[in-house]
Image (cartoon, rainbow, N blue to C red):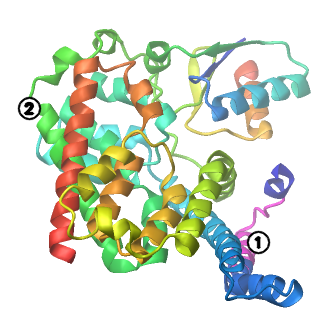
């Protein structure tokens, strides 16, 4: 599983990355978390409101920082399906 | 703070009770504010209310508490309401619109769409890739910070309905006119080429869709915390300057240089305001204190618009997608529109 956090380095982008890593740790999963800070690359995902969360090339969240529990659900759903 | 957030009850009745309780606590604090400082400074500490320093300190503490409370209330309500809108929806509404109608719609949508200046670049690329004309995109980017919820809420609380409506209309006119003018000069040649080469892939998701009420309330609370965290230094400096102007600057000081009779007052105010980076909340206490000292409303509104519409950090961000020529044109057209609005209001409101 490849998880990407889209955002140019704003506070919310860092928060989302932290929440994502915490969610992975709680799930006991070891996935790769990449930061995407390049604007064309962010836009290429169709994301216009940062931060964005991408799991295996599918945008699952954009424009807000979800709670840890929600990120866990999203990761679990992607891993199960 | 996150503990508090986790404890919001998810039942509808619980949500309503929590919100009603929070509103009651807010009103109580707002009403108590002046009495608390009266009691503490002039009662418990025995300071003389007629003394300038004591009065300035009182003004500072009272204003800090009042403006913080106003911001908490305004940001929370606006964020929850705006969570039903998104940049994605706005783009869909603007796609295929002609200039003219498009500029008007973009300016109006700029007011109601939740938008953080940190998303200005991806939003710009997204708009252009979806075929929204550049001038229309500019109208959106100008209106969004200019007519923002904090400016509107604070103006309404401190100056009343008339000034607020004047400000909103003026801000919309600046955004529509400036965007339309920029659209007239074939601005495409001054956009960095990578913007047009970016291919939109993936399935964009709409951040406004499918949120529960709990999530919207949580977004409101987080937005309050994140904005207050970001702007508190500007807020304290602004209120401090406001308190000093209120207590120490003689009434005729500013009016001599920038009063109703001064022909360059508006130009000077806008020139000072453009590079200044502050939040609408940070400069409002200063604007209020300057108004008390007799500065004309049009000059003050122009100053405020210049501060919130144009700032150095935003220009640095926009430089990623705009070539210097277009950036200079952008600053020039928006600045000139604001100056014109300032003079118009000084003439109308005098």
Q: Quadrant of residue B213?
A: bottom right
> Which of the two discs, 2 and 1, sits closer to the camera?
2
Task: Residue at 57%, 20% (x, y): give it.
Answer: A58
The residue segment tinted magenta is B7-23
User: CA separation, marks 2 and 1?
Assistant: 54 Å
Is any part of residue B76 visible from this angle? no
Task: Residue at 46%, 24% (x, y): give it.
Answer: B203
Which residue bears the numbered disc 1? B14
Q: Are marks 2 and 1 on the same chain?
A: yes
Residue B23, percent across and down?
Answer: 68, 77
Which residue bears the numbered disc 2? B184
Q: Residues within 10 Å of mark 1 (few under 14, many from 20)?
A: few
Q: Image check: B23 left or right of A47? A: right
Which quadrant does the N terminus of chain A fall into? top right
The foreground one among B294 and B251 is B251
Residue A27, percent across and down?
Answer: 88, 25
The foreground one among B110 and B337 is B337
Which quadrant does the C terminus of chain A fall into? top right
Report the disc number at residue B2: none
Q: Main secondary structure of the magenta part?
A: helix
- The answer for which chain carries disc 2 is B
Against B289, residue B32 (above or below) is below
Is any part of residue B70 visible from this angle? yes
Element type where label 1 sits in the image:
helix
The foreground one among B126 and B329 is B329
Q: Is residue B9 magenta?
A: yes
Element type where label 2 sits in the image:
loop
């Amino acid at each position: 599983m490849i998880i990407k956090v889209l955002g140019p380095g704003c506070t919310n982008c860092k928060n989302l990355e932290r929440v994502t890593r915490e969610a992975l740790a709680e799930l006991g999963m070891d996935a790769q978390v990449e930061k995407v800070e390049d604007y064309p690359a962010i836009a290429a995902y169709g994301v216009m409101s940062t931060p964005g969360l991408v799991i295996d090339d599918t945008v699952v969240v954009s424009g807000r920082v979800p709670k840890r529990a929600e990120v866990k659900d999203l990761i679990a759903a992607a891993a199960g399906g | 703070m996150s503990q508090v957030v986790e404890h919001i009850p998810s039942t509808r009745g619980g949500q309503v009770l929590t919100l009603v309780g929070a509103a009651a606590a807010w009103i109580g604090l707002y009403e108590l504010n002046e009495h608390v400082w009266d009691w503490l400074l002039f009662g418990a500490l025995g300071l003389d209310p007629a003394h300038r320093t004591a009065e300035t300190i009182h003004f500072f503490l009272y204003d800090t508490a009042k403006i913080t409370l106003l911001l908490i209330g305004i940001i929370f309500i606006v964020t929850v309401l705006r969570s039903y809108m998104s940049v994605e929806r706005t783009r869909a509404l603007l796609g295929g619109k002609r200039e003219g109608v498009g500029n008007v719609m973009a300016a109006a949508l700029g007011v109601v769409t939740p938008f953080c200046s940190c998303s200005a670049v991806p939003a710009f690329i997204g708009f252009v890739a979806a075929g929204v004309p550049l001038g229309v995109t500019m109208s959106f980017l100008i209106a969004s910070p200019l007519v923002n919820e904090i400016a509107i809420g604070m103006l309404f609380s401190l100056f009343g309905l008339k000034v607020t409506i004047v400000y909103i209309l003026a801000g919309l006119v600046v955004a529509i006119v400036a965007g339309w003018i920029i659209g007239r000069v074939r601005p495409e040649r001054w956009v960095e080429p990578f913007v047009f080469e970016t291919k939109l892939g993936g399935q964009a998701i709409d951040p406004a869709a499918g949120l529960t009420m709990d999530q919207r309330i949580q977004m409101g609370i987080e937005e309050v915390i994140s904005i207050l965290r970001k702007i508190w230094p500007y807020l304290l400096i602004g209120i401090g300057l406001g308190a000093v102007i209120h207590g120490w600057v003689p009434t005729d000081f500013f009016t001599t240089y920038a009063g109703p009779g001064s022909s360059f007052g508006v130009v000077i105010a806008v020139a000072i305001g453009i590079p200044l980076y502050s939040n609408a909340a940070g400069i409002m206490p200063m604007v209020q204190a300057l108004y008390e000292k007799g500065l004309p409303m049009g000059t003050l509104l122009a100053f405020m618009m210049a501060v919130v519409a144009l700032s150095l950090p935003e220009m640095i961000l926009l430089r990623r997608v705009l070539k210097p020529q277009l950036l200079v044109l952008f600053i020039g057209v928006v600045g000139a529109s604001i100056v014109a609005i300032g003079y118009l209001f000084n003439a109308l409101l005098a």
